Image (cartoon, helix red, strand yellow):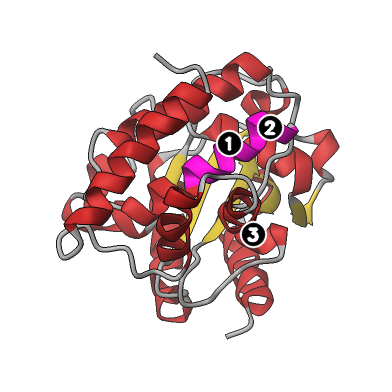
Amino acid sequence: MDPRILLDQIAAQLSTSLGEQLVGVYVHGSLAHGDFDWDASDLDLIAIVRGGLNPSLRQGVVEGLLDMEAQFPPRGIELSLVRREFSLRFVYPTPYELHFSNASRESFLADPRAFCSDAWRVDHDLATHFALIREKGITWRGEEIGAVFGEVPQELLLDSVWRDLDASMADLDTNPAYLVLNLCRTLAYFATGRMLSKGQGAAWALGDLPAMYQGLVRGALERRLDLKSQPEARQTLQAFCRYCRQRLARP
C-alpha cells in the first residue's frame, strides 16, 4: 500500500475522532527522510491536540486505529497525541495524551479502561521526535510545523537520545539492529549537527567507522543481525557500544 494513502486515511480517522480538537498531524522518521521501507519501517506520527482528551475520546481514537490496522505496514505505526501547549512551549519530559504502537496495542486490548484513563503520562523520547519534526518533518494535515513545535534545547535533546540508547544497550537482545542504527544516527548527529533517519545515519557511519564495525552496520541495515546464532556479532556489538560511549564522551 502507498504509505501516503494510508497517512491520508489515518489523518481522516483522527479528524473524525477528535473533531476541532485536532490541530495537525505531523510525520517524522524514515518516511520524512525519504528512506521508508514498507517491510522494515514503521510510520512515525505525532498528532497535536487542543486541550486534554477525556477517556472516551482516547478510546475512540484507539478503536478507530485498530479498525484500520490490517492496512498498516508489518511494523505498524507509532503515534503520540500531545497537547499543543506542551509542543509549542516545550516541556521535558513531555506529557502526552495517548500513545499507540504495535507494542502498546496489547495493553489496550488487555485493559481499555486503564489504557485510556486520565493518568499523567510523560515520554522522554518525544524530545527527539519533536527535533526531527522541526528539522525535516512533514505537515500532513493542519497548522504548519513552526506554529506548533517550539525549539527543543540541545541539552534536553541529548538527554532524550542518551536515555533511549542506555535502555537499548542494557538489553542487547531485544532489538540489536535498532541499537546499531540508532548509535550510527547519534554518532552522525554529534559529528554533523544534523538529525538523520536511522538508515541515513548508517550510510554516514559506513564512511566513518573503523572497518571492524562496518559488517555490524550492514547486518543491521539488511535485517540479518542475529545475536543468538551469531555469538561473534554479540561481541562486536558490545565492543561497538564501548567505542560509541568513548567517542561520544559518555561515562
Q: Which residue was labeled with disc 2?
A: 191
What is the three-letter code of the residue carrying label 1?
Leu
Q: Which residue was labeled with disc 3?
A: 15
Q: Residue at x 64, y 82 (%)?
A: 2
What is the three-letter code of the residue carrying label 3?
Ser
Element under label 1?
Answer: helix
Choose top left, top right, bottom left or bottom right for residue 186: top right
Element under label 2?
Answer: helix
User: Nearer the N terminus, badge 2 or badge 3?
Assistant: 3
Image spot of residue 46 (x, y percent): 60, 47
Element under label 3?
Answer: helix
Foreground residue, 242 or 92?
A: 242
Circles 1 and 3, Cβ within 8 Å, touching? The answer is: no
Q: Residues within 10 Å of mark 1 (few under 14, many from 20)?
A: many
Q: Single out the mark in the foreground, 1 or 3.
A: 1
Asked if residue 204 is positioned above or below residue 120 in the image, the reply reads: below
Circles 2 and 1, Cβ within 8 Å, touching? The answer is: yes
**Magenta: predominant secondary structure element?**
helix
What is the three-letter code of the residue carrying label 2?
Ala
Foreground residue, 216 or 65?
A: 216
Q: Residues within 10 Å of mark 2 (few under 14, many from 20)?
A: few
* Boundaries of the magenta span: 182-192
Q: Is residue 249 magenta?
A: no
Q: Residue at x 68, y 23 (%)?
A: 152
